[in-house]
Image (cartoon, grey):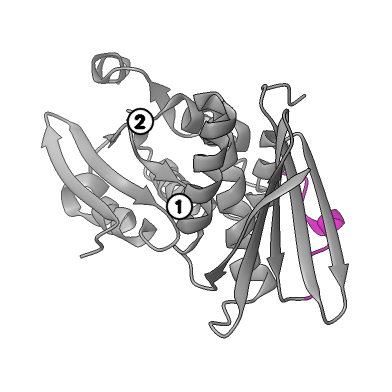
Amino acid sequence: MEKLVELHIPNILGSEKTAIEKAVSIAREMGFSNDRVEDLKTAVSEACINAIEHGNKFDINTKVGITLASDEKALEVTIHDEGEGINPEKVPKERTAPNGFPRRRGYGIFLIKNLVNEISFASEPGKGNDVKMIIHLENNVS
Amino acid sequence: MNKDIEVSTSQKNDVAFINIQGDVTAVTGEVIKNAYKNEIVSNSPKILFRFDKDCYINSGGLAFLIDIASEGRKKEQKISAVGLSEHFKKIFHMIGLTRCISLFDTEESALEDF
Protein backbone atom coordinates (compact mmCIF):
# COMPACT_ATOMS: atom_id res chain seq x y z
CA MET A 1 0.00 0.00 0.00
CA GLU A 2 1.22 3.50 -0.82
CA LYS A 3 0.58 6.10 1.85
CA LEU A 4 -1.36 9.00 0.38
CA VAL A 5 -2.54 11.26 3.16
CA GLU A 6 -2.25 11.67 6.90
CA LEU A 7 -4.48 14.14 8.72
CA HIS A 8 -5.53 14.91 12.25
CA ILE A 9 -8.96 16.09 13.29
CA PRO A 10 -10.12 17.66 16.56
CA ASN A 11 -11.70 15.28 19.05
CA ILE A 12 -15.15 16.76 18.53
CA LEU A 13 -18.22 15.05 17.05
CA GLY A 14 -18.76 16.47 13.57
CA SER A 15 -15.08 16.82 12.76
CA GLU A 16 -15.20 13.32 11.21
CA LYS A 17 -16.65 15.02 8.13
CA THR A 18 -13.15 16.24 7.22
CA ALA A 19 -11.90 12.65 7.18
CA ILE A 20 -14.92 11.48 5.20
CA GLU A 21 -14.43 14.17 2.55
CA LYS A 22 -10.77 13.29 2.11
CA ALA A 23 -11.45 9.55 1.89
CA VAL A 24 -14.27 10.11 -0.60
CA SER A 25 -12.12 12.34 -2.76
CA ILE A 26 -9.42 9.67 -3.01
CA ALA A 27 -11.94 6.85 -3.51
CA ARG A 28 -13.56 8.67 -6.43
CA GLU A 29 -10.16 9.26 -8.03
CA MET A 30 -9.50 5.53 -7.66
CA GLY A 31 -12.74 4.68 -9.43
CA PHE A 32 -14.89 3.47 -6.54
CA SER A 33 -18.54 3.00 -7.48
CA ASN A 34 -21.11 5.21 -5.78
CA ASP A 35 -22.25 2.25 -3.65
CA ARG A 36 -18.74 1.62 -2.39
CA VAL A 37 -18.21 5.32 -1.72
CA GLU A 38 -21.31 5.28 0.50
CA ASP A 39 -20.00 2.22 2.34
CA LEU A 40 -16.67 3.97 2.81
CA LYS A 41 -18.33 7.13 4.15
CA THR A 42 -20.22 5.21 6.82
CA ALA A 43 -17.19 3.11 7.77
CA VAL A 44 -14.90 6.15 8.14
CA SER A 45 -17.60 8.04 10.00
CA GLU A 46 -18.25 5.26 12.50
CA ALA A 47 -14.56 4.58 13.09
CA CYS A 48 -13.90 8.29 13.76
CA ILE A 49 -16.90 8.56 16.07
CA ASN A 50 -15.70 5.52 18.02
CA ALA A 51 -12.25 7.11 18.32
CA ILE A 52 -13.71 10.40 19.56
CA GLU A 53 -16.24 8.85 21.92
CA HIS A 54 -14.74 5.58 23.18
CA GLY A 55 -11.03 6.03 22.44
CA ASN A 56 -10.38 9.63 23.38
CA LYS A 57 -13.47 9.80 25.60
CA PHE A 58 -14.50 13.24 24.29
CA ASP A 59 -11.26 14.79 25.58
CA ILE A 60 -10.87 17.98 23.49
CA ASN A 61 -7.15 18.01 24.20
CA THR A 62 -6.68 14.88 22.10
CA LYS A 63 -6.83 14.32 18.37
CA VAL A 64 -7.87 11.58 15.96
CA GLY A 65 -5.40 10.64 13.26
CA ILE A 66 -6.44 9.32 9.87
CA THR A 67 -4.05 7.71 7.42
CA LEU A 68 -5.10 6.81 3.89
CA ALA A 69 -3.12 4.42 1.73
CA SER A 70 -3.96 2.58 -1.44
CA ASP A 71 -2.97 0.11 -4.08
CA GLU A 72 -4.69 -0.49 -7.40
CA LYS A 73 -7.50 -2.57 -5.87
CA ALA A 74 -8.20 -1.16 -2.44
CA LEU A 75 -8.12 1.77 -0.07
CA GLU A 76 -6.73 1.32 3.43
CA VAL A 77 -7.95 3.69 6.15
CA THR A 78 -6.33 3.68 9.58
CA ILE A 79 -7.97 5.62 12.41
CA HIS A 80 -5.77 6.35 15.40
CA ASP A 81 -6.86 7.56 18.82
CA GLU A 82 -4.97 8.26 22.00
CA GLY A 83 -7.02 6.01 24.25
CA GLU A 84 -6.59 2.53 25.58
CA GLY A 85 -8.41 0.89 22.74
CA ILE A 86 -11.45 -1.31 22.56
CA ASN A 87 -11.78 -5.02 22.85
CA PRO A 88 -13.66 -6.04 19.71
CA GLU A 89 -14.61 -9.30 21.40
CA LYS A 90 -16.65 -7.29 23.88
CA VAL A 91 -18.73 -5.65 21.19
CA PRO A 92 -22.22 -7.12 21.56
CA LYS A 93 -23.04 -9.48 18.71
CA GLU A 94 -26.75 -9.44 19.47
CA ARG A 95 -28.39 -6.51 17.71
CA THR A 96 -31.77 -6.94 19.35
CA ALA A 97 -32.82 -5.72 22.76
CA PRO A 98 -34.96 -7.99 24.98
CA ASN A 99 -38.10 -6.18 23.80
CA GLY A 100 -37.40 -7.24 20.21
CA PHE A 101 -36.28 -3.77 19.14
CA PRO A 102 -32.85 -2.93 17.79
CA ARG A 103 -30.47 -1.92 20.56
CA ARG A 104 -30.09 1.84 20.87
CA ARG A 105 -26.31 2.08 20.56
CA GLY A 106 -23.28 -0.01 19.71
CA TYR A 107 -23.58 -0.20 15.92
CA GLY A 108 -20.28 1.39 14.95
CA ILE A 109 -18.09 -1.68 14.67
CA PHE A 110 -21.03 -3.83 13.60
CA LEU A 111 -21.65 -1.55 10.62
CA ILE A 112 -17.96 -1.28 9.73
CA LYS A 113 -17.59 -5.07 9.75
CA ASN A 114 -20.53 -5.36 7.39
CA LEU A 115 -19.35 -2.65 5.00
CA VAL A 116 -15.59 -3.14 4.59
CA ASN A 117 -13.59 -6.12 3.38
CA GLU A 118 -11.12 -6.28 6.26
CA ILE A 119 -10.88 -4.72 9.70
CA SER A 120 -8.18 -5.11 12.35
CA PHE A 121 -7.45 -3.57 15.72
CA ALA A 122 -4.13 -2.77 17.36
CA SER A 123 -3.44 -1.22 20.74
CA GLU A 124 -0.26 -0.42 22.53
CA PRO A 125 -0.21 0.91 26.10
CA GLY A 126 0.61 4.60 26.08
CA LYS A 127 0.55 4.82 22.30
CA GLY A 128 -3.14 4.60 21.59
CA ASN A 129 -5.31 2.47 19.42
CA ASP A 130 -5.48 1.84 15.68
CA VAL A 131 -8.44 0.59 13.68
CA LYS A 132 -7.39 -0.43 10.18
CA MET A 133 -10.02 -0.92 7.50
CA ILE A 134 -9.47 -2.12 3.95
CA ILE A 135 -12.18 -1.51 1.42
CA HIS A 136 -11.96 -2.96 -2.07
CA LEU A 137 -12.98 -1.16 -5.23
CA GLU A 138 -15.45 -3.91 -6.03
CA ASN A 139 -18.25 -4.78 -3.68
CA ASN A 140 -17.45 -8.31 -2.61
CA VAL A 141 -18.05 -8.12 1.15
CA SER A 142 -19.43 -11.52 2.15
CA MET B 1 -31.52 26.03 15.73
CA ASN B 2 -29.07 23.41 14.55
CA LYS B 3 -27.54 24.42 11.20
CA ASP B 4 -26.72 20.81 10.29
CA ILE B 5 -30.34 19.75 10.14
CA GLU B 6 -33.73 21.14 9.19
CA VAL B 7 -36.78 19.39 10.55
CA SER B 8 -40.39 20.38 10.06
CA THR B 9 -43.70 18.72 10.78
CA SER B 10 -47.02 18.74 9.00
CA GLN B 11 -50.26 16.80 8.96
CA LYS B 12 -52.73 15.54 6.38
CA ASN B 13 -55.80 13.63 7.50
CA ASP B 14 -54.57 11.16 10.12
CA VAL B 15 -50.96 11.11 8.93
CA ALA B 16 -48.27 13.23 10.55
CA PHE B 17 -45.17 14.02 8.54
CA ILE B 18 -41.66 14.62 9.86
CA ASN B 19 -39.60 16.23 7.10
CA ILE B 20 -35.82 15.90 7.52
CA GLN B 21 -33.03 17.60 5.60
CA GLY B 22 -29.38 17.36 6.60
CA ASP B 23 -27.39 15.24 9.00
CA VAL B 24 -29.02 12.79 11.40
CA THR B 25 -26.39 12.35 14.11
CA ALA B 26 -25.95 12.24 17.87
CA VAL B 27 -25.63 16.04 17.72
CA THR B 28 -28.79 16.71 15.68
CA GLY B 29 -30.96 13.76 16.75
CA GLU B 30 -32.54 15.75 19.55
CA VAL B 31 -34.10 18.06 16.93
CA ILE B 32 -35.93 15.08 15.40
CA LYS B 33 -36.96 13.82 18.81
CA ASN B 34 -38.39 17.22 19.64
CA ALA B 35 -40.33 17.17 16.36
CA TYR B 36 -41.76 13.80 17.35
CA LYS B 37 -42.82 15.26 20.70
CA ASN B 38 -44.85 17.89 18.85
CA GLU B 39 -48.46 17.34 19.87
CA ILE B 40 -49.67 16.76 16.31
CA VAL B 41 -47.06 14.09 15.69
CA SER B 42 -46.98 12.36 19.04
CA ASN B 43 -50.76 11.88 19.01
CA SER B 44 -51.01 10.77 15.40
CA PRO B 45 -51.69 7.08 14.69
CA LYS B 46 -49.59 7.23 11.52
CA ILE B 47 -46.22 8.89 11.07
CA LEU B 48 -44.26 9.27 7.87
CA PHE B 49 -40.60 10.31 7.94
CA ARG B 50 -39.76 12.19 4.75
CA PHE B 51 -35.98 12.08 4.41
CA ASP B 52 -34.24 14.26 1.89
CA LYS B 53 -32.32 12.10 -0.60
CA ASP B 54 -29.03 13.63 0.55
CA CYS B 55 -29.60 12.91 4.24
CA TYR B 56 -26.57 11.57 6.04
CA ILE B 57 -27.25 9.26 8.99
CA ASN B 58 -24.75 7.79 11.43
CA SER B 59 -25.10 5.45 14.38
CA GLY B 60 -25.62 8.35 16.78
CA GLY B 61 -28.61 9.47 14.69
CA LEU B 62 -29.94 5.93 14.36
CA ALA B 63 -30.18 5.83 18.16
CA PHE B 64 -32.72 8.66 18.09
CA LEU B 65 -34.76 6.97 15.35
CA ILE B 66 -34.79 3.78 17.44
CA ASP B 67 -36.03 5.83 20.41
CA ILE B 68 -38.89 7.22 18.33
CA ALA B 69 -39.78 3.81 16.90
CA SER B 70 -39.80 2.39 20.42
CA GLU B 71 -42.00 5.17 21.71
CA GLY B 72 -44.25 4.77 18.66
CA ARG B 73 -44.75 1.09 19.34
CA LYS B 74 -45.86 1.85 22.89
CA LYS B 75 -48.45 4.24 21.46
CA GLU B 76 -49.41 1.76 18.72
CA GLN B 77 -48.37 4.22 16.05
CA LYS B 78 -47.48 2.99 12.58
CA ILE B 79 -44.23 4.55 11.38
CA SER B 80 -42.92 4.55 7.82
CA ALA B 81 -40.20 6.37 5.91
CA VAL B 82 -39.55 7.55 2.37
CA GLY B 83 -36.67 9.26 0.64
CA LEU B 84 -33.81 7.24 2.06
CA SER B 85 -30.96 6.46 -0.31
CA GLU B 86 -30.31 2.81 -1.15
CA HIS B 87 -27.31 2.91 1.18
CA PHE B 88 -29.31 3.97 4.20
CA LYS B 89 -32.09 1.51 3.36
CA LYS B 90 -29.36 -1.12 3.58
CA ILE B 91 -28.20 0.26 6.94
CA PHE B 92 -31.77 0.19 8.30
CA HIS B 93 -32.05 -3.46 7.23
CA MET B 94 -28.65 -4.32 8.73
CA ILE B 95 -29.55 -3.13 12.20
CA GLY B 96 -33.13 -4.39 12.12
CA LEU B 97 -34.76 -0.98 12.12
CA THR B 98 -37.05 -2.08 9.29
CA ARG B 99 -38.87 -4.24 11.83
CA CYS B 100 -40.27 -1.04 13.33
CA ILE B 101 -40.06 1.50 10.51
CA SER B 102 -41.42 0.42 7.11
CA LEU B 103 -39.48 1.75 4.12
CA PHE B 104 -41.06 2.83 0.85
CA ASP B 105 -39.75 4.16 -2.44
CA THR B 106 -42.55 6.65 -2.90
CA GLU B 107 -44.81 8.69 -0.67
CA GLU B 108 -47.84 7.34 -2.53
CA SER B 109 -46.97 3.75 -1.70
CA ALA B 110 -46.28 4.65 1.94
CA LEU B 111 -49.64 6.39 2.26
CA GLU B 112 -51.45 3.50 0.60
CA ASP B 113 -49.89 1.10 3.10
CA PHE B 114 -51.26 3.13 6.01
Dominant secondary structure, magenta = loop
Query: According to the image, label 1 marks what residue?
Result: B61
Q: How packed is label 1: few (under 14 Cα within 10 Å), some, or many (20 or more)?
A: many
Q: Quadrant of the N terminus of chain A?
A: top right
Q: Secondary structure at mark 2?
A: strand
Identify whether B74 is placed above or below A35: below
Which chain is disc 2 placed on? B
Q: Amino acid at mark 1?
A: Gly
Q: Give percent across and percent down for residue A38.
A: 52, 34
Query: According to the image, label 2 marks what residue?
Result: B81
Q: Toward the viewer: B94 or A20?
A: A20
Tell me whether the residue at label 1 lies in contact with that at label 2, contact meaning CB atoms closer than 8 angstroms.
no
**Relative to B20, A49 lies left or right:** right
Q: Secondary structure at mark 1?
A: helix
> Which residue is depicted at the point 54% across and 25% down?
A35
Q: Give percent across and percent down for residue B50.
A: 27, 34
> Which residue is depicted at the point 75% across and 56% down?
A131
Is residue B33 rendered magenta in the image? no
Q: Quadrant of residue B10?
A: top left
Q: Amino acid at mark 2?
A: Ala
For discs 1 and 2, the disc positioned in front in the rendered view: 1
Q: Earlier in the sequence, mark 1 or mark 2?
A: 1
Task: Give the extent of the magenta segment.
Answer: A84-95
**Relative to A1, B51 lies left or right:** left
Q: Give percent across and percent down for residue A139.
A: 67, 22
Q: Is residue B58 visible?
A: no
Is residue A88 rendered magenta in the image? yes
Q: Measure the alpha-carbon separation of dots 1 and 2.
A: 15 Å
Which chain is disc 1 placed on? B
Q: Toward the viewer: A31 or A133?
A: A31
> Which residue is depicted at the point 73% across and 28% down?
A73
**Relative to B66, A56 lies left or right:** right
